[in-house]
């Protein structure tokens, strides 16, 4: 069995394979993580939205850190592959608080984090954190991981395409400026959320010398097409969790409206899922 340092080294290596992207079908609880691993995942990533929803909270820095990391620990203990945790903006207002989160992530058994540069005001309205402030936070995260002796993969999320304004050239320039600052602060990779246009994605790949992570899903190029553009990592984000909840809603509406059960067809078998969890305990 690999130790945490070996898992971290393996996880880093999965981002540096020419022409082959790391694919992450994000999980939100132990059962979904085991299903993802069984499907062939080389690593398991959590989705902050899915984790928050499963614990009864909205996404967007509203979930308590201890509850989020307890779930990360449960997932890391259940699967054999490396685990990376989506920690939103870090569960803390200061660099010191983010460093505390990173130490807790490592203690939970994860070897990677996503840290977003979205910041929310007192009303929960999202905006972009100033570049220098976010770079200081990433530097604090890197220092905390180094002090723990674990080469944590810090995936620095750039939310310019979600929160920024301006023409395409201005957005690209702003995204690359942030990517460079986060690289210099100690980020291992860059995660740009929003673009699906191949030309924009290719320009992002060319403009940063760190592995690039983008979201896959409806409307985005296929994994193979993204890999051909130079993308190192493709994540599903919250889409799989949202699809699972869509099944729950369709099945419930069908039961209450027509009294039929067609939405329940094709589910994972009770015995199959039970056996998967039993193997984890064994």
Image (cartoon, rainbow, N blue to C red):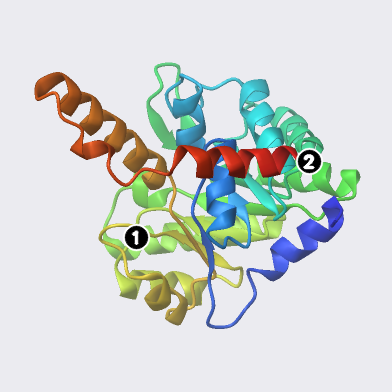
Q: 136 and 80: which one is in front?
A: 80
Q: Which numbered tag is attached to residue 106?
A: 2
Residue 255: quadrant of the picture: top left
For the residue pair 80 and 259, the one nearer the viewer reads as 259
Relative placement, left or right, of 22 versus 57 is right
Local crowd size for mark 2, using a 10 Å CA cut-off: few (<14), some (14–19), many (≥20): many
Secondary structure type for disc 1:
loop
Residue 280 percent across, percent down from the top left: 69, 42
| Residue 238, placed above or below residue 7 | above
Image spot of residue 29 (x, y percent): 55, 35
Position of 130 compared to 9: left or right? left
Q: CA distance from mark 1 to mark 2?
A: 31 Å
Q: How crowded is the residue under tag 1: few (<14 C-alpha within 10 Å), some, or many (20+)?
A: some
Point out the image quarter for the C terminus.
top right
Q: Which mark is residue 93?
A: none
Q: Nearer the viewer, mark 1 or mark 2?
A: 2
The residue indicated by pointer 1 is 195
**Left or right, residue 204 beside residue 31:** left
Q: Nearer the viewer, residue 119 or 188?
A: 188
């Amino acid at each position: 069995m690999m130790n945490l340092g070996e898992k971290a080294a393996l996880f880093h290596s999965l981002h540096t394979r020419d022409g082959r992207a790391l694919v992450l079908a994000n999980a939100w609880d132990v059962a979904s993580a085991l299903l993802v691993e069984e499907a062939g995942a080389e690593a398991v990533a959590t989705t902050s939205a899915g984790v928050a929803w499963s614990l009864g909270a909205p996404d967007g820095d509203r979930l308590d850190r201890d509850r989020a990391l307890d779930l990360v620990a449960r997932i890391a203990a259940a699967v054999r592959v490396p685990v990376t945790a989506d920690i939103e903006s870090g569960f803390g207002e200061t660099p010191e608080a983010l460093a505390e989160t990173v130490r807790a992530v490592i203690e939970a058994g994860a070897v990677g984090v996503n840290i977003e540069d979205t910041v929310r005001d007192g009303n929960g309205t999202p905006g972009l954190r100033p570049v220098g402030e976010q770079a200081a936070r990433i530097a604090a995260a890197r220092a905390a991981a180094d002090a723990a002796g674990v080469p944590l993969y810090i995936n620095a999320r750039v939310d310019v395409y979600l929160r920024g304004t301006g023409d395409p050239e201005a957005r690209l320039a702003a995204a690359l400026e942030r990517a460079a600052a986060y690289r210099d602060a100690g980020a291992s990779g860059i995660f740009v959320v929003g673009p699906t246009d191949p030309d924009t994605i290719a320009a992002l790949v060319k403009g940063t010398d760190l592995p690039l992570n983008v979201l896959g899903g409806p409307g985005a190029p296929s994994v193979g097409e993204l890999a051909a553009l130079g993308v190192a990592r493709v994540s599903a984000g919250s889409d799989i969790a949202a699809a699972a909840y869509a099944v729950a809603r369709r099945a419930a509406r069908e039961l209450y409206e027509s009294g039929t059960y067609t939405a329940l067809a094709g589910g994972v078998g009770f015995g199959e899922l039970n056996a998967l969890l039993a193997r984890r305990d064994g």
